[in-house]
Image: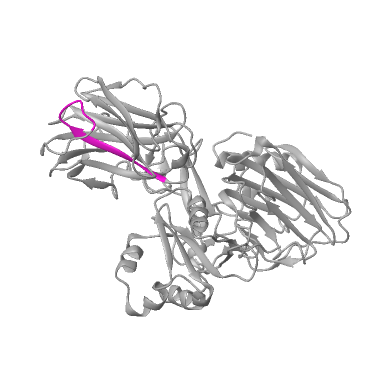
Amino acid sequence: MTSAVLILPAAARDAGNALGASMGWGPSSYSVALSPTGSAPATHYGCCAEVSAGFLALLASPPPEAAPVLAVLTIDTRETADPGAHWHEVLAAHGLVMVSDD
Amino acid sequence: MANRGRSLHPLRPLRPGRRSQSDLASLFRSGDVGILFEPQRLDTLWQDAAGVTPISTYGQGAQRLGDRSGGGHHATQASAASALIYGRHPVGGTRNQLIQTESFTGWQQAFLSATTGVTDAEGGKRAATLLRTADGDGAISVAAGLASASPIVVSVDAKAGASDWIVVQATLLPSPAGAYAVFNAATGAAGITGVYGTNAPTLSAPIPPVSLGNGWWRFFLKFTPHAASVGLTFSSWFKPVSANVSNQTTNVGQSITIARPQVEVGASATTYQRVGNAHDVTEAGKSDCYYGLCDGADNSLATAAFAWGSDKVYLCAAVRKNSDAAVGIIAEFSPTVATNNGMFQLAAPISLANNYSFTSKGTVAASASYTNAAVAAPHFAVIECIADIATDTSQLWIDGVMVAASGVDQGAGPFGTYQLFIGRRNNATLPFNGLLYGLMGLNRLPSDAERATARRLMAAKQGRTL
């Protein structure tokens, strides 16, 4: 299994969730609100998941219906026992932080 | 002893009426309301929220945790990306930072081929023979993360083949940067060492090679990374060479056999740990600890709403807190403390500091928080939380010691009817970064003896004794 961090612009979240649902990932894959400051509104949504080699192969050779989402999807993969560190490193690299609920 | 080919541990579901003091479920009496989640119980772990497909291997996501309290308050997650990750590590935790240390699956092979399943120093089949098949800097390598500028030790078993010499090398970022040590695998003699690059690491005093018998040696490279390399990845390289040199781009046909690679942070080399995927780590002679990983990003589960049924709470959780860098919710009864009465919450940490915190709220929140360097992440803990709205009790206990208490008037109870969220607030924010070995909640205050049993059994899940 491989840790994968996936980030979508907020405008593409619904399409990303629909694509994830069509792949059997459930209704709300992109559940983490992100923004440059940590304040609402979210500019992006992300998720961090353990993915299989099959999933990565699908990304390398995606079906046509995935193209609009993949065109704006940021994805970073790593073999790690610490997906939390992976997640925060990728967010930092892209200038994003989790939106606080405070 | 070889440590390979281990399968998931067998489990027998317990029958009602046959629960003993070795089972946390025995603490639930008829009429009690609560929850009991034990991620090592394979009879309660499912890959899907509906509970159709059981967990079958390490690294899989658990979208359903069955409640063993008897109340049927199962915790689920509709989205696979947010499932808790099922894994195991040896007692004491994971040290080996590599992956696939016996299959070498996913390792990069440059100008050589690796034949796996070769006999190792202990008679197992955990070794790989590296054969240079083309001109170039032939090496097998694998990457790992570099979290700090602390010393790192790379270890590997090696046996001479067509080559007597092996280069053990670490390549770091920003490139070029690295360190290497060359060894003679036929004699165990240490060869040349060196560092290179603008942000070169620092070599430490060499660790002497260790003879393993049958022509096998264990070799070590110890170095301290440059600060510029921290937060980036680095790779461990193993290269067969025909002489005492650090780099060789010819000599097709050179070969050497390696086994049991390990990369660890620390001043010395420790016992080898087998790593399958990153969530499947074992060590010969040590018990396995089974967990659900909350990744600090989006992993969380929730029960359906249920009535707590009293103004008292006892929580007991076995966790490993991985980070203090962001607020994390281990468990929260209600979507948020801010707008709901009759709720409770366990957080680790509650601020960007070394702490744990428990909050109980009738109509007013009473928090018992403990900040101390002794609980800085990474930190194993058995946490107990005790609350009684009527007596204005809110206590936080760690490993059997009360570390914080609040006598603030909590207003009126009882606790309400809510979902219990595990790992994130309302399945949305404040993700906990850590391992969950067990979580129980009870709507009464247990006796001292019952609490001692809960602590002991929870600590045992971490390989600890309390």
Question: Does the magenta segment cover residue B182?
Answer: no
Residue B459 sits above or below residue B277 on the image = above
Quarter in which the N terminus of chain B is drawn: top left
**The quadrant where residue B216 appears:** top left
Q: Residue B356: percent from the left, percent from the top?
A: 69, 46
Residue B219 sits above or below residue B398 on the image = above
> Is B254 positioned to the left or the right of B360 in the image?
left
> Is A49 positioned to the left or the right of B381 in the image?
left
> Is B191 positioned to the left or the right of B200 in the image?
left
Residue at position x 60%, y 46% from top?
A: B319
Quarter in which the C terminus of chain B is drawn: top right
Residue at position x 10%, y 39% from top?
A: B252
In-front residue for pair B344/B75: B344
How is this picture coloured? one colour
In-front residue for pair B443/A93: A93
The part of the chain drawn in magenta is B233-246
**The quadrant where residue B461 appears:** top right
Helix, strand or loop for the magenta stretch, by majority = strand
Q: Residue B151: percent from the left, percent from the top?
A: 45, 31
Residue at the front extreme of this rendering? B198
Asked if residue B40 shows in the view, the reply is no
Q: Residue B436: percent from the left, percent from the top?
A: 57, 49
Residue B144 sits above or below residue A96 on the image = above
Q: Residue B208: percent from the left, percent from the top?
A: 34, 20
In-front residue for pair B388/B338: B338
Residue B302 sits above or below residue B433 on the image = below
Numbered disc total = 0
